[in-house]
Image: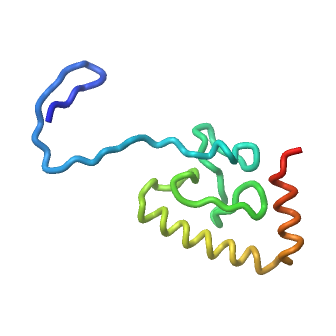
Amino acid sequence: MMVKNRKTGETEEIHPAGVFVFVGLSPNSEPFKDIVKVDAQGFIMTGIDFQTSTEGIFAAGDVRAGSTKQLVSAAGEGAAAALAIREHLRGHDARTLEAALVGSTAKG
């Protein structure tokens, strides 16, 4: 395999045992940037309970600021966020919660 140093332009042939392709790391948070706080790179900010800056909205996985960007970690975060959501919902009447969420995400 030929590889090129992007800084120096130098090329060399290597013979790796395996190749892992990394296609980039840009969070797909654009639809949420006006609803929740994001960091300078666009990752969604959360508390330790995965709740965002907007009550009742949670984020987990690669889109979350501070995540490890690993598949197994994202799955674990998803499970932990689901438990946090369940706890959050226990303290709310479903009708009031729906009205609050619709009101906080609707654009006027």
Left or right: residue 69 compared with residue 22: right
Q: Residue furthest top?
A: 9
**Residue at the spot x=84%, y=46% of the render?**
107
Q: Is residue 67 shown left or right of residue 87?
A: left
Image position, residue 70 (x, y; %)? 42, 57
Q: Residue 28: image x %, image y %?
A: 57, 45
Find residue 47 and report its image quarter.
bottom right
Residue at 27%, 48% (x, y): give it: 20
In the image, is 40 to the left or to the right of 74? right
Quadrant in which the N terminus is drawn = top left
Which residue is at a point 45% across and 63% down the rendered structure image?
A: 73
Kindly indicate the quadrant of the structure image that contains residue 33: top right
Query: Relative to residue 77, is residue 14 depicted above or below?
Result: above
The location of residue 90, given as percent across then percent down, is 77, 80
Quadrant of the image containing the C terminus: top right
Circle count: 0
On the image, the x and y values in percent for residue 78 come to 55, 67
Query: Is 72 drawn above or below residue 22 in the view shown?
Result: below
Say which residue appears at 42% left-offset and 40% top-offset: 24
Residue lying furthest bottom in this view? 90
